[in-house]
Image (cartoon, helix red, strand yellow):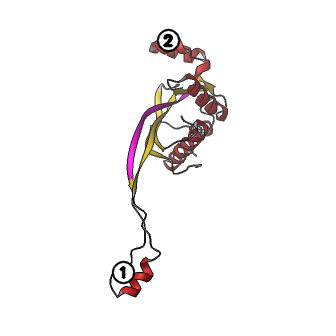
């Protein structure tokens, strides 16, 4: 389970467990028991349109997972047209026994209102108290902010059983650099899986 733990603690796309990234849902296969050393040679893949970003994310993941190989070194751009049989044959010939896949789902904009602040003086009790409490009291008006929320899906496949054994969805608000956000998402997912008893 240690290898899977490292894989999932390295997941994604794009705080050590900071508030900007949260896991919104997760699922694990209740019929699969994973032990230390379960995966010997997992493939790490980031399904992204931009090739440069894909390589950054996959390299980041591969550095953290012993034995992991980035998908760009196995599948080229033309391999996106391969059928299922050809993909499985390539994975088998490469000796892969697991796969960690991250995929960008959406980017949404959320508008929120930040209420104003200030000290409200007492209008009753005479002129003196009102003057004293209001003289240095100023009101800051409320305002609207717009946040960018990125949603990323992370899946772990057991290629020996040819099935999905864990899946999680994370939400990142106003993410910064790819490397930093990758670490944030990884930490949140690993924490969630430990809480579920899927990681030790």
- Magenta segment: does it hold 101? yes
Labelled pair 1, 2 in contact (Cβ < 8 Å): no
* Rendered image quadrant of residue 151: top left
- Sequence-first tag of 1 and 2: 2
Taking depth in this image into account, of 31 and 149 the one nearest to the observer is: 149
Which residue lies at the image location 49% right of the left edge and 26% below the top edge? 161
Q: Position of residue 124 (x, y in %)?
A: 32, 84
Which residue lies at the image location 49% right of the left edge and 23% below the top edge? 49
Q: Considering the image in quadrants, where does the N terminus appear?
A: top right
Is residue 38 shown left or right of residue 84? right
Can residue 30 be seen?
Answer: no
Q: Position of residue 196 (x, y in %)?
A: 48, 47
Q: Position of residue 147 (x, y in %)?
A: 44, 45
Main SS class of the magenta portion in the image: strand
Task: Write the start and end of the magenta stretch as one range.
Answer: 99-112
* Rendered image quadrant of residue 117: bottom left
Q: Which residue is mark 2?
A: 86
- Cα distance, mark 1 to mark 2? 77 Å
Taking depth in this image into account, of 24 and 67 the one nearest to the observer is: 24
- Magenta segment: does it hold 7? no
Can residue 20 be seen?
Answer: yes
Quick one: SS at disc 1? loop
Few, some or many residues within 10 Å of mark 2 (<14, 14–19, 20+): few
Q: Which residue is mark 1?
A: 122
Is residue 20 shown left or right of residue 65? left
Q: Nearer the viewer, mark 1 or mark 2?
A: 1
């Amino acid at each position: 389970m240690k290898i899977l733990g490292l894989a999932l603690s390295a997941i994604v796309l794009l705080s050590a467990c900071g508030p900007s990234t949260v896991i919104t849902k997760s699922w694990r296969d209740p019929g699969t028991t994973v032990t230390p050393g379960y995966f010997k040679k997992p493939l790490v893949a980031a399904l992204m349109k931009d090739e440069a970003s894909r390589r950054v994310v996959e390299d980041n993941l591969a550095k953290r997972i012993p034995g992991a190989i980035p998908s760009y070194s196995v599948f080229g751009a033309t391999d996106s047209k391969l059928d299922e049989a050809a993909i499985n044959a390539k994975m088998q010939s490469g000796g892969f026994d697991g796969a960690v896949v991250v995929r960008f789902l959406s980017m949404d904009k959320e508008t929120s209102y930040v209420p104003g602040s200030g000290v409200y003086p007492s209008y009753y009790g005479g002129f003196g108290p009102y003057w004293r409490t209001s003289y240095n009291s100023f009101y800051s008006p409320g305002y609207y902010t717009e946040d960018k929320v990125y949603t990323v899906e992370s899946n772990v496949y057991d290629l020996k059983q040819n099935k999905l054994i864990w899946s999680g969805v994370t939400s990142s608000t106003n993410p910064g650099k790819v490397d930093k956000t990758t670490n944030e998402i990884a930490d949140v997912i690993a924490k969630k899986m430990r809480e579920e008893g899927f990681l030790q």
